[in-house]
Amino acid sequence: MEELARLAGITVRTLRFYRERKLIPPPRREGRIAWYDDHHLARLRTIAALLERGHTLTGIAELAEALDHGRDVADVLGVTPPTEEEPVRLTPEELAARFEGQVTPENLAAALELGYLGTDGDEIVHISRRLLDISSALVREGIPLAEVLAAGKHVREHVDALAENFAVLILRHGTESDLQRLRPLARSVVDAELSLALDRRLRKQE
C-alpha cells in the first residue's frame, strides 16, 4: 500500500479512503500480504485526472462501479449510444495499440467525459466505430490524442446545436417518427455545409 501510494503521488490515508469508498478494486491477497498492480495505479491516476476536471468523488465512485461490474460507462454518464453508430469492443491492449501509447489517464478521463468509452466485463466499448477509426487515423497523422479529444468536445457542442435546430424544424411540422425518418437529410446538410466551409478555408490559404 505504501509503494502504491508513493507511485500515485498520494498519501496512504488518501489511498485507504479511496478503498473505503470502493474507488479502486481490492488487492490480491496472499495470506496477510496485499498485492497491488498496474491496474490499481492506472485507476488512481485516472481518479486524479477526473478530480482535476471537476468531477466529484461520488461521480467517480459511480464510474468505478461501472468499471468493476461491467456496466456501460456511457449509461452512467447519461450518454445514450447513437442508434446508427456501430460500437466496437476492444481489450485495453488493443485500445493502447490504436493510439500508440497515448492512452494516458488524462486522455482516458476526457474520453469518459465525452461518453466515447464504456465497459462490458473486461472489454472496453467505444460507442462509434467511425469515431474510433477517425481518431486513430488523426493520431497516426501526428496529431496528439489530447488535441483530437479536445476537438471532439468542441464539435460535440456545435452538432448538439445543429441537431436541436433540425429537430425543432421537423417537429414543428411532423412527429418523432418523421424526425427519425428524415435524419439522413440532416446528415447530408451538415456534410455539404462542412465541405463548402472547408472549400472556403482552403481558398483563404491560396
Image (cartoon, rainbow, N blue to C red):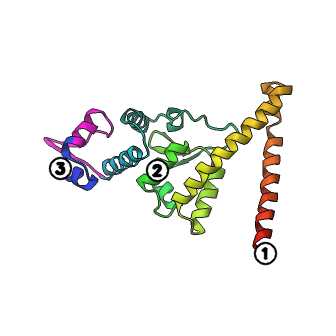
Among the two numbered marks 2 and 3 on one chain, the one whose residue lies closer to the N terminus: 3
Q: Nearer the viewer, residue 58 or 125?
A: 58
Would you identify the image quadrant in which residue 13 lies?
Answer: top left
- Residue located 73% across and 39% down the image: 163
Amino acid under label 3?
Glu
- Residue located 49% across and 40% down the image: 119
Highlighted range, magenta: 14-37
Q: Which residue is mark 3?
A: 2
Amino acid under label 2?
Leu
Residue that lies at the very extreme toward the bottom in this rendered image? 206
Q: Position of residue 96 (x, y in %)?
A: 47, 58
Question: Could you tell me how far apart the alpha carbons at marks 2 and 3 are, in whole angstroms?
Answer: 25 Å
Would residue 35 appear left or right of 125 to someone viewing this image?
left
Q: Position of residue 154 (x, y in %)?
A: 61, 50
Q: Secondary structure at mark 1?
A: loop
Q: Secondary structure at mark 2?
A: helix
Would residue 53 appear left or right of 32 to someone viewing this image?
right
Taking the magenta stretch, the answer to whether it contains residue 27 is yes
Number of the label disc, if any, that sits on residue 206: 1
Among the two numbered marks 1 and 2 on one chain, the one whose residue lies closer to the N terminus: 2
Q: Position of residue 59 (x, y in %)?
A: 42, 34
Question: Which mark lies nearer to you, 1 or 2?
Answer: 1
Question: Could you tell me how far apart the alpha carbons at marks 3 and 1 are, in whole angstroms?
Answer: 60 Å
Q: Which residue is mark 2?
A: 108
Quarter containing the C terminus = bottom right
Question: Could you tell me how far apart the alpha carbons at marks 1 and 2 are, in whole angstroms?
Answer: 38 Å
Q: Position of residue 173 (x, y in %)?
A: 86, 26
Amino acid under label 1?
Glu
